Image (spheres, helix red, strand yellow):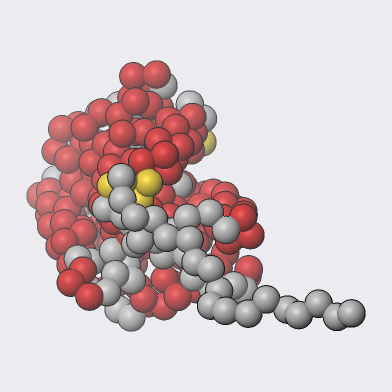
C-alpha cells in the first residue's frame, strides 16, 4: 500500500490586521524592548559634547527593515524614548536621540519600498541634505577649513551619495537575499548609509547648540568612521542572526518588511 502525497496550493500565513502599518503590535513591542535594552550599553565616546553612544544605534536600521518604514520608526522611536529615561548615561539631548532613531528606521524601511511608497526615500534624503548644509555651513563660518569639513563628514556625504544612487536598492536586494554573506554585506552597508543621514541631521542640531571649536573637527576625522564601522558591524551581526531565524521559523512577515 502506498500513501499518496498531499497536493494543492502551498499554505501561506498572512497578517490580516490589528497592527501598525502591516506589522503586528507584538513585533513593535519586542523590537522596542530590544532598542531599550541596547541603550544601556555604551560603545564610544562623543568627543564633541561628552557622553557616549548607545549600542542601540546599530539596530535602528534593522528595525526599519524588519517592520517597514512607519512601524519601524514607531518601534525604534519608542524604544529610544524609554532608553532616555532608563539609560541616561548614553543620552545627552533626548529629542535628538529620538529623531535619529525615527529617521534611521524610516530611511531603512523606505529603501526598497514600491508602489505608492516608491518615492518615500526622498524624505530622509532631503533631511540629510539640509542637515549637511547646516552642519558644514556653520563649520565654515566658524573657521573650519573646507578640506577638514569634508574629511570629518565623510561618513555623511558618502551616505547621501549611496542613498541617492541605485546602491540604495542594491543593498536592499542584498538584505533580502538568502546568501548569508551578501545579506551581511547589505546589512553593514545599509546601516552605514541610513544612519549617516540621521547622524548629520543630529550633528547639525547639536553643533548649533554646543558649537565646539574648529580643533575638534580634526580630532573627529579618524574617530567617526570607526564608530560607523562599529554600528555597521552591530547591525550585520545581529541582523544576520535575526533575519535567518525569522525565515527558518516561518513567523508572520510584516507587510512592508525588507527581508
Q: Residue at x 16, y 56 (%)?
A: 127
Residue 114 appears at what percent x and percent y? Answer: 27, 74
| Horizontal side of residue 142 vs 192, given as left or right | left
| Horizontal side of residue 107 vs 87, given as left or right | left
| Horizontal side of residue 233 vs 58, given as left or right | right
Residue 29 appears at what percent x and percent y? Answer: 40, 36
| Horizontal side of residue 240 vs 56, given as left or right | right
Q: Is residue 223 above or below residue 187?
A: above
Q: Is residue 49 above or below residue 108?
A: above
Residue 94 appears at what percent x and percent y? Answer: 25, 28
Residue 8 appears at what percent x and percent y? Answer: 57, 79
Taking the view exactly as shown, the residue that stands out farthest to the right is: 1
Q: Residue at x 45, y 75 (%)?
A: 173
Q: In this orientation, which residue lies closer to the viewer: 26 or 164?
A: 26
Q: Is residue 101 visible?
A: no
Q: Quadrant of the N terminus?
A: bottom right
Q: In this orientation, which residue lies closer to the viewer: 202 or 83?
A: 83
Amino acid at each position: 500500500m502506498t500513501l499518496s502525497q498531499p497536493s494543492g496550493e502551498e499554505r501561506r500565513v498572512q497578517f490580516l490586521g490589528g497592527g501598525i502599518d502591516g506589522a503586528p503590535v507584538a513585533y513593535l513591542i519586542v523590537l522596542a524592548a530590544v532598542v531599550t535594552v541596547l541603550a544601556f550599553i555604551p560603545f564610544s565616546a562623543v568627543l564633541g559634547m561628552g557622553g557616549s553612544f548607545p549600542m542601540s544605534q546599530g539596530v535602528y536600521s534593522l528595525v526599519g527593515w524588519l517592520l517597514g518604514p512607519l512601524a519601524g520608526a514607531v518601534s525604534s522611536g519608542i524604544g529610544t524614548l524609554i532608553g532616555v529615561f532608563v539609560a541616561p548615561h548614553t543620552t545627552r539631548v533626548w529629542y535628538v536621540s529620538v529623531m535619529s532613531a525615527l529617521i534611521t528606521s524610516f530611511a531603512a524601511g523606505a529603501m526598497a519600498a514600491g508602489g505608492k511608497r516608491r518615492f518615500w526615500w526622498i524624505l530622509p534624503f532631503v533631511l540629510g541634505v539640509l542637515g549637511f548644509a547646516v552642519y558644514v555651513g556653520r563649520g565654515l563660518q566658524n573657521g573650519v577649513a573646507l578640506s577638514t569639513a569634508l574629511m570629518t563628514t565623510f561618513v555623511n556625504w558618502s551616505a547621501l551619495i549611496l542613498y541617492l544612487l541605485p546602491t540604495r536598492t542594491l543593498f536592499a536586494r542584498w538584505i533580502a537575499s538568502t546568501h548569508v554573506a551578501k545579506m551581511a554585506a547589505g546589512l553593514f552597508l545599509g546601516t552605514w548609509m541610513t544612519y549617516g543621514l540621521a547622524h548629520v541631521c543630529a550633528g547639525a542640531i547639536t553643533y548649533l547648540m554646543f558649537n565646539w571649536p574648529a580643533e575638534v573637527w580634526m580630532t573627529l576625522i579618524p574617530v567617526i568612521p570607526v564608530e560607523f564601522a562599529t554600528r555597521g558591524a552591530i547591525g550585520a551581526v545581529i541582523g544576520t542572526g535575526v533575519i535567518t531565524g525569522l525565515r527558518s521559523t516561518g513567523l508572520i512577515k510584516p507587510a512592508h518588511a525588507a527581508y
